[in-house]
Image (cartoon, helix red, strand yellow):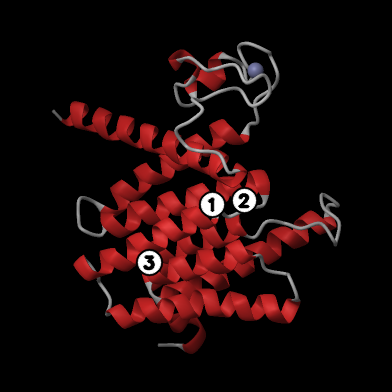
């Protein structure tokens, strides 16, 4: 029974992550997620079910299209591995509780926008809007915090990044601003501020390393979405402990 259930859960997350990856790859290009059916981006050859097994197909085909042999971006299988692992991690971290209504969609959102941002430097409006509506309705049914905390979250996430965008004149993309408004609606203003703080910290360190090792030039844009996603993930799962540790070590109580 245990084995059957585990297999079911793993297959469910594999299929879900495959779907989220299709969303991440197609929506920014203005394509429909159902039509045309899965095809090679180079030769447009329609892919058969055997070419579409998550992760396994990529390994078996050695990263090349079966039909035209052109290389397939490593972001596709990595995106699926990342999404599946994070969904599984979330499930084990949260357990079977109502919090899964927040946790799974939040992780789904973060994975989807990370892949889109890495591939195209776009965080799609449609994805942001979908999850914004979802979380604003969900919190009428299930909300660990007062509803006002979520409304303030929109302000804390979206407002703060908008302010930075205005001050820095384009240092922050519109997609980043909207994403953090959605995160605010999902987890409330306190954890949203922490998410942004962690994202800036990690983004700053990584940006600095990339500059010093000459992987990027000063003017090269580095997509900030993946850092916002990582910051949000850390704040969501360990935020309370981080704040407690901070207060304890820095302020002594
Ligand atoms: Zn091809």
Q: Secondary structure at mark 2?
A: helix
Q: Quadrant of ligand 1?
A: top right
Query: In this view of the protein, which residue sits in the foreground, 9 or 213?
Result: 9
User: Residue at label 2?
Assistant: 117
**Which image quadrant: the C terminus?**
bottom left
> Where residue 204 appears, x then y in whole percent?
69, 66
Q: Is residue 23 left or right of residue 166?
A: left
What distance separates the C-alpha of mark 1 from that of mark 2? 6 Å
Q: Residue 136 is drawn in which quadrant?
A: bottom left
Please report contact status of discs 2 and 3: CB closer than 8 Å, yes or no: no
Whether residue 234 is visible, yes or no, is: yes
The earlier-in-sequence mark between 2 and 3 is 2
Q: Secondary structure at mark 1?
A: helix
Q: Residue 163 is drawn in which quadrant?
A: bottom right
Q: Is residue 225 left or right of residue 97?
A: right
> Where residue 121 appears, x then y in whole percent?
67, 52
Instruction: Rate crowding at label 3 as few (under 14), some (14 to 19) or many (20 or more) other CA atoms within 10 Å.
Output: many
Q: Secondary structure at mark 3?
A: helix
The earlier-in-sequence mark between 1 and 3 is 1
């Amino acid at each position: 029974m245990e084995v059957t259930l585990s297999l079911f859960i793993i297959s469910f997350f594999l299929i879900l992550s495959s779907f989220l990856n299709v969303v991440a790859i197609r929506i920014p290009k203005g394509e429909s997620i159902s039509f045309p059916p899965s095809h090679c981006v180079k030769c447009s050859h329609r892919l058969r079910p055997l070419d579409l097994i998550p992760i396994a197909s990529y390994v078996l085909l050695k990263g090349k299209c079966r039909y035209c042999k052109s290389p397939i971006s490593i972001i596709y299988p990595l995106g699926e591995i990342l999404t599946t692992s994070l969904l599984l991690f979330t499930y084990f971290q949260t357990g079977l509780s109502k919090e899964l209504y927040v946790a799974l969609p939040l992780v789904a959102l973060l994975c989807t926008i990370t892949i889109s941002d890495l591939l195209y430097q776009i965080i799609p409006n449609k994805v942001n809007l979908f999850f914004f509506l979802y979380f604003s309705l969900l919190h009428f049914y299930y909300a660990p915090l007062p509803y006002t905390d979520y409304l303030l979250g929109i302000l804390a996430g979206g407002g703060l990044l908008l302010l930075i965008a205005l001050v820095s004149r384009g240092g922050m993309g519109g997609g980043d601003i909207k994403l953090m408004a959605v995160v605010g609606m999902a987890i409330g203003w306190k954890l949203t501020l922490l998410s942004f703080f962690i994202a800036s910290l990690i983004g700053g360190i990584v940006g600095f390393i990339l500059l010093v090792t000459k992987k990027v030039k000063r003017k090269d844009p580095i997509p900030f979405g993946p850092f916002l996603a990582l910051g949000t993930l850390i704040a969501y799962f360990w935020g309370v402990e981080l704040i407690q540790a901070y207060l304890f070590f820095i302020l002594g109580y």
